[in-house]
């Protein structure tokens, strides 16, 4: 085979992608968000590991035991509120598919309200504990107990601010690709917080009541 | 293990090389390679095996690299085969040899770990069944001194460890403040000494003598001066040491210890002996620290170590400790 | 102002005052030069607000080099102190009992040295090189998230700046780069030093985590058509495995540090000795990051070697598939070995056994890599140009560093010298391997980025001085390890160690020469750049995609995205006789537009970290609020792209084809973009 025909051959395969479309924006963005969620999952994993390490009797340092700290009413209330919120967010995604702006805004608003209820309950629970002198400084166990629930609550707060931003963006922009990918990412984020809450509920609250 | 034996014999050789290079007889200063205790001896034995086996593969690898570079350099004599990039047989060898080596090393490592387990060194149980009751020593690291308590003898000594030779010694160790690391290079390896916790270590000295001990984990401004002397002596000499300590006027109570444990930089050694040590001091310290007792290091002290040291020296002379 | 007051400026310390004056003069000179040449606009438009992955990479490398220099000065100070302060009769200067550094000052120096070298020199240099090369190697026009990329850079820069600030305002942590508890808790370290350390570290964690998300997404999502997984260049593979490590472990470090911060700021008891804290937890959390981190550093270095060795052996890489497998094996195992950093913590023998074995397992895939490089040279035609020299040095450093690492992994050996200088010598060979690979790849890829080669004479002098310095400093250090010398001593209590320490000082002389030669190397290269211009394929025998575009690389990387047919696409095209880069007619190219937001966020992060360090609460609150506000405002920026028009592309391409000299103001030949219409 002569050099000429060999290179002709190669050329016919196409050397350059002349009609490069660029990369799929929504796919790339959501992929990155998944990666971010992985890092957040690692943070939670480290916190739960810490919780495991600091849940022994010596870590109570003579302070209150888990059973004395946990109040099931708050824990159940928070669970219900968060799952209602996630459900409402699911509704928002249905509305997005249907292209219904008003429904989407309404559903986001509902999700925010339920999130607010969650935060309110968490706040009064913590308030109650602080009044009883049960503070993070009291023992290693309480340090991580509060650390874990506060870190989770912080996510809820961030999620709510994000929802507010999305409501404004949907109102002013409609369904641009930027808005859509953000809504998808927020869904991931919000569902993830619910999943984490299941772990918090199981390990911190349920296990706490039996210990 | 026959292979182990041969390899080891063969490798005494290689091991001699750095020693030669250093003019190495007793005064090379390579403390780790001049063990004088049962545990350190064992550690060095395994060290020799480990290094020997690894050199068997690292040295040929280095030679192979040099050979390939030389022979296949541009203008060299090697035949140029630009497309050659795979060979199943070579792949098998390059995965296989390290795999086998690591398997052998793993076996040795695990064996050594059990023999030298500081809580229960099986090597000691094997060789020292008849050596009598072990001597108990409780070690408390403060900022920045070592307190050695002999609980059965009710005496204590600061920055100076006196032990009889050939008799097993069982340490319990804790710290008042931060983490330290207890080490006597020629006698016993490191063990972390942690506040609010108790760890154990064992040691047997084979030869009378004077051995240096160090604190290895960073513990603050006084770290570099936190070394101690170990005197391995005969049984009679040890008895004399105990008797002399008992007749010393000073006692050490829980409250006295409270003062003793304040940060103190032991420049120049600062030895001390206590004749009557309160029973259970070690356990008391562990419990106190667990409850949250802290002997703080003032920032001022960290920053101006020299001034502090002089001031403390004056206080000590004035009868405080 | 929180704890901040004028008293915190260490004007009594002549060393620091000298440094400060020097920094002041240097800073003034830079500001003066920029002003004189009226370059502020260019600086802002082309650099501070850029989202171009190549420029971001170059800035990462600059930060890395400056910090490398700082780390070097620290090393020099440690070595001189240890050479002087030997034995009780050694002299003392400047308020020190022995030597010229008080324990407090010496402590800050080795802590800063370690932290700077690992997270502010090696990491930025590697991240920078990955930033530059990975998108080029996969035929992409930019990273997946250019904005995030810039943010990562400016957060890292903020961290580095914070460390530098600690030199002149207050002090730095003084206990070791990886921190100790309870030593780093308030009762034992009440000053701001630990807080500086905490926040600088935390900023770099954030920056690197963002960077790893970006690199992974880029590699997964942005490959040119035809570039299947098994056609990916090996450096890209190495970057992928390294960044997977970073992605999964840096968050753990974030937690580790956050809990320590909580102890210090809120009085919690995560790591305290009493009150139910657990100080061993800190070690676990730290080293769950810390060990994988060293492989995060070394895997890209291995990737670099795997690019350089085939190019200069003029041959395909031996065992591509095994190389990939080995990278992931190293990455995977790295997760399960961390306990080897505290074998001496009295864990049960079964536990120590487990970690001893897993640690040694790493030797297998690493060994495979070594053999693959050797068999790449085998039957090749090896050319010893500068990049190759560095790669060969790396290979030998790996053999010795790996051997000594395996010695540490044998737990009972580690009992003898953990916390001793033997370990220090082990890891310095390893990190110097990384440094050597970095120098090698800077030589290797420099012409790609800037369009001209670095000259070779001073470069070789630099190389040999590093070789000599390394031998001269670290061989005695190994012997000192056997002599039982422990780490982090500011005073040497055992005089027998003295002679070795003085010998090592001679070695430092070679390092000083090396740094001088390095400056000459840069200066002469820059001066004679016209002589050393290169085309697309600077070395003639390179094989991967980045050599398929012009040098310096245009802003858009490739006028057309390449279609990939083979593993070594460029080598394949050369062989097929289709290595011609000319191709038209051109089209508009969409590129991300510049933005000042990441820079502003970096500055705010610096303010926040500084305020937290000094407990200036109003400033902390303000900076945090501004950060949040800026992020939200940015979320409303709709069209952040620009377009490079087809005419601009054509003009730029023609300049390259005509062999026109691309001016230095446009190091990457960036044609002026027009805003989108
Ligand atoms: C990447 C990591 C890295 C690197 C490269 C180095 C490089 C060096 N280090 Fe470092 N070191 C550490 C990481 C590193 N170190 C860590 C983690 C510790 C532990 C800290 C602790 O104890 O907590 C440590 C501790 C440490 C000690 C410990 C002291 C002790 O504990 O007793 C010593 C002592 O000699 C030392 C010396 C050196 C020397 C001589 C070099 C030399 O190799 C330096 C040579 C440097 C160069 C050759 C670079 C030259 C610079 C340029 C070329 C740039 C030019 C500049 C511009 C263009 C702007 N180091
Ligand atoms: C990039 C950096 C880097 C790299 C790549 C490594 C690689 C390795 N390291 Fe190192 N290490 C550090 C940086 C690094 N290390 C640092 C910074 C510290 C201390 C931090 C501090 O305390 O401040 C440290 C500390 C450290 C310790 C703790 C010591 C202590 O504190 O007591 C141990 C213990 O096991 C260890 C082991 C190893 C091993 C087994 C490898 C292996 O990956 C090496 C594998 C390579 C080879 C084995 C060579 C090539 C292989 C062959 C030719 C095949 C055949 C060979 C055999 C089968 C033997 N390292
Ligand atoms: Cu480890 Cu206590
Ligand atoms: Cu490690």
Image (cartoon, coloured by chain):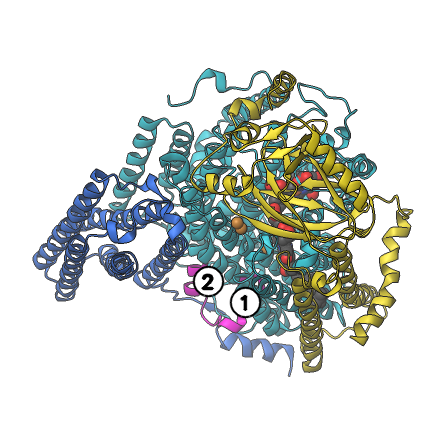
C321 w.r.t. C23: above or below = below
Percent across and percent down for residue A144 are 35, 48
Quarter of the image with the N terminus of chain C is top left
Instruction: Tell me whether circle 2 and circle 1 mark residues in contact (CB < 8 Å).
Output: no
Percent across and percent down for residue C37 are 52, 26
B36 to the left or right of A24: right
Specify the quarter for ligand 4.
bottom right
The foreground one among C307 and C535 is C307
C439 to the left or right of A141: right
Residue C370 seen in the current view: no
Percent across and percent down for residue A123 are 19, 44
**Which chain's colour is yellow?**
B
Tell me what hue chain C is rendered in. cyan
Crowd class of label 2 (few under 14; some 14 to 19; many from 20; radius 10 Å)? many
Q: Which residue is drawn at 11% across and 52% down?
A: A109
Residue with the mark numbered 2: C219
Q: Which residue is drawn at 45% across and 56% down?
A: C247
For the image, the number of numbered tags is: 2
Q: What stretch is highlighted in magenta?
A: C215-236
| Residue C230 highlighted magenta (yes or no) | yes
Q: Chain ID for label 1?
A: C
Q: Chain ID for label 2?
A: C
Q: Which residue is drawn at 8% across and 59% down?
A: A103
The numbered mark at residue C452 is: none
| Residue B17 highlighted magenta (yes or no) | no
Q: Report how far apart the C-alphas of labels 2 and 1 lie in the structure.
A: 15 Å
**Which chain's colour is blue?**
A
Residue with the mark numbered 1: C328
């Amino acid at each position: 085979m002569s050099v000429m025909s060999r290179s002709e051959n190669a050329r016919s395969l196409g050397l350059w992608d002349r009609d490069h479309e660029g990369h799929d924006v929504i796919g790339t963005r959501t992929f990155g968000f998944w990666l971010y969620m992985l890092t957040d999952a690692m943070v939670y994993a480290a916190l739960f590991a810490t919780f495991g390490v600091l849940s022994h009797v010596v870590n109570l340092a003579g302070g209150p035991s888990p059973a004395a700290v946990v109040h099931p009413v708050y824990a159940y209330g928070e669970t219900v509120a968060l799952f209602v919120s996630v459900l409402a967010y699911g509704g928002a995604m249905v509305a997005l598919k249907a292209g219904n702006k008003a429904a989407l805004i309404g559903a986001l608003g509902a999700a925010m309200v339920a999130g607010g209820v969650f935060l309110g309950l968490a706040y009064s629970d913590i308030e109650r504990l602080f009044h009883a002198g049960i503070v993070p400084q009291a023992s290693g166990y309480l340090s991580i107990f509060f650390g874990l629930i506060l870190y989770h609550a912080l996510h809820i707060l961030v999620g709510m601010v994000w929802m507010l931003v999305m409501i404004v963006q949907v109102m002013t922009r409609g369904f641009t690709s930027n808005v859509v990918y953000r809504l998808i990412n927020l869904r991931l984020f919000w569902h993830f917080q619910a999943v984490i809450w299941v772990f918090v509920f199981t390990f911190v609250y349920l296990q706490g009541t039996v210990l | 293990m026959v292979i182990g034996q041969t390899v080891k014999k063969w490798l005494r050789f290689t091991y001699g090389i750095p020693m030669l290079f250093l003019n190495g007889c007793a005064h090379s200063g390579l403390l780790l390679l001049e063990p004088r205790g049962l545990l350190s001896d064992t550690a060095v034995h395994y060290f020799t095996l480990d290094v020997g086996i690894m050199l068997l593969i690292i040295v040929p690898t280095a030679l192979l690299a040099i050979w390939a570079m030389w022979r296949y350099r541009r203008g060299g004599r090697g035949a140029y085969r630009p497309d050659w990039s795979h060979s199943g047989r070579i792949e098998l060898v390059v995965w296989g040899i390290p795999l086998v080596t690591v398997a052998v090393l793993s076996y040795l490592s695990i064996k050594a770990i059990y023999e030298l387990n500081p809580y229960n060194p099986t090597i000691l149980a094997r060789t020292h069944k008849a050596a009598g009751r072990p001597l108990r020593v409780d070690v408390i690291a403060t900022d920045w001194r070592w307190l050695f308590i002999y609980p059965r003898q009710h005496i204590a000594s600061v920055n100076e460890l006196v032990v009889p030779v050939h008799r097993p010694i069982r340490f319990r160790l804790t710290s008042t403040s931060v983490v330290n690391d207890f080490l006597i290079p020629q006698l016993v390896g490191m063990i972390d000494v942690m506040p609010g916790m108790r760890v154990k270590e064992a040691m047997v000295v084979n030869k009378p003598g004077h051995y240096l001990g160090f604190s290895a984990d960073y513990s603050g401004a006084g770290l570099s001066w936190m070394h101690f002397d170990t005197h391995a002596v005969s049984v009679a000499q040890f008895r004399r040491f105990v008797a002399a300590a008992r007749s010393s006027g000073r006692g050490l109570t829980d409250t006295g210890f409270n003062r003793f444990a304040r940060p103190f930089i032991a420049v120049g050694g600062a030895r001390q002996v206590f004749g009557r040590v309160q029973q259970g001091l070690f356990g008391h310290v562990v419990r106190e620290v667990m409850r949250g007792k802290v002997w703080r290091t003032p920032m001022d002290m960290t920053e101006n170590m020299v001034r502090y040291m002089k001031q403390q020296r004056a206080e000590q002379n004035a009868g405080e400790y | 102002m929180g704890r901040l007051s004028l008293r915190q400026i260490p004007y009594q310390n002549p060393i620091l005052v000298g440094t400060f004056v020097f920094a002041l003069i240097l800073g003034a000179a830079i500001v003066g030069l920029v002003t004189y040449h009226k370059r502020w606009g260019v600086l802002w438009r082309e650099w501070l607000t850029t989202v171009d992955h190549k420029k971001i990479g170059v800035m990462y490398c600059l930060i890395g080099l400056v910090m490398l220099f700082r780390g070097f000065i620290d090393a020099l100070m440690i070595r001189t102190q240890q050479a002087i302060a030997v034995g009780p009769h050694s002299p003392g200067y400047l308020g020190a009992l022995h030597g010229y550094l008080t324990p407090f000052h010496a402590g800050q120096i080795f802590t800063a040295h370690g932290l700077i070298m690992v997270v502010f020199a090696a990491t930025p240099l590697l991240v920078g090189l990955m930033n530059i090369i990975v998108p080029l190697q996969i035929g992409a026009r930019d990273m997946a998230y250019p904005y995030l990329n810039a943010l990562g850079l400016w957060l890292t820069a903020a961290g580095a700046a914070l460390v530098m600030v600690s030199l002149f305002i207050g002090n730095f942590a003084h206990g070791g780069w990886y921190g100790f508890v309870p030593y780093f808790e308030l009762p034992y370290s009440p000053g701001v030093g630990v807080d500086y350390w905490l926040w600088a570290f935390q900023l770099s964690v954030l920056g690197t985590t963002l960077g790893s998300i970006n690199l992974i997404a880029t590699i997964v999502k942005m490959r040119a058509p035809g570039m299947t997984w098994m056609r990916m260049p090996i450096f890209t593979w190495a970057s992928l495995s390294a960044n997977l490590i970073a992605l999964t472990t840096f968050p753990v470090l974030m937690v580790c540090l956050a809990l320590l911060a909580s102890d210090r700021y809120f009085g919690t008891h995560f790591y305290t000795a009493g009150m139910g804290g657990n100080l061993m937890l800190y070690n676990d959390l730290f080293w769950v990051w810390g060990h994988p981190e060293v492989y995060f550093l070394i895997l890209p270095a291995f990737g670099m070697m795997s690019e350089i060795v085939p190019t200069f052996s003029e041959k395909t890489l031996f065992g591509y598939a095994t190389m990939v497998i080995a990278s992931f094996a190293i990455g995977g195992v790295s997760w399960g070995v961390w306990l080897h950093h505290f074998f001496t913590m009295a864990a049960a023998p079964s536990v120590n056994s487990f970690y001893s074995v897993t640690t040694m397992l790493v030797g297998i895939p690493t060994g495979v890599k070594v053999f693959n490089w050797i068999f790449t040279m085998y039957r090749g035609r090896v050319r010893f140009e500068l990049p190759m020299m560095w790669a060969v040095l790396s290979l030998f450093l790996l053999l010795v560093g790996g051997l000594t690492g395996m010695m540490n992994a044998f737990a009972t050996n580690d009992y003898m010298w953990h916390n001793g200088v033997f370990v220090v010598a082990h890891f310095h060979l390893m990190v110097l391997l990384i440094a050597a690979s970095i120098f090698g790849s800077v030589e290797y890829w420099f012409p790609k980025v800037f369009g001209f080669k670095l000259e070779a004479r001073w470069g070789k002098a630099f190389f040999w001085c590093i070789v000599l310095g390394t031998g001269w400093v670290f061989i005695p250090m190994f012997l000192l390890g056997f002599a039982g010398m422990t780490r982090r001593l500011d005073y040497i209590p055992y005089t027998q160690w003295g002679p070795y320490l003085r010998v090592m000082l001679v070695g430092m002389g070679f390092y000083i020469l090396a740094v001088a030669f390095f400056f000459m190397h840069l200066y002469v290269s820059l001066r004679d750049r016209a002589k050393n211009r290169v085309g697309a394929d600077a070395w003639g025998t390179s094989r991967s995609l980045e050599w398929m575009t012009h040098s310096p690389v245009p802003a858009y990387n490739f006028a057309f995205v390449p279609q990939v047919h083979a593993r070594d696409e460029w080598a394949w095209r050369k062989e097929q006789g289709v290595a011609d880069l000319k191709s038209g007619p051109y089209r508009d190219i969409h590129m991300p537009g510049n933005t000042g937001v990441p820079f502003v966020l970096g500055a705010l992060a610096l303010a926040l970290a500084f305020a937290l360090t000094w407990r200036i609460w109003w400033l902390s609150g303000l900076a945090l609020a501004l950060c949040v506000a800026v992020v939200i405002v940015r979320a409303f920026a709709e069209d952040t792209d620009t377009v490079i028009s087809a005419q601009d592309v054509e003009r730029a391409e023609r300049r390259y084809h005509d062999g026109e000299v691309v001016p230095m103001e446009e190091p990457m030949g960036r044609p002026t973009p027009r805003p989108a219409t």
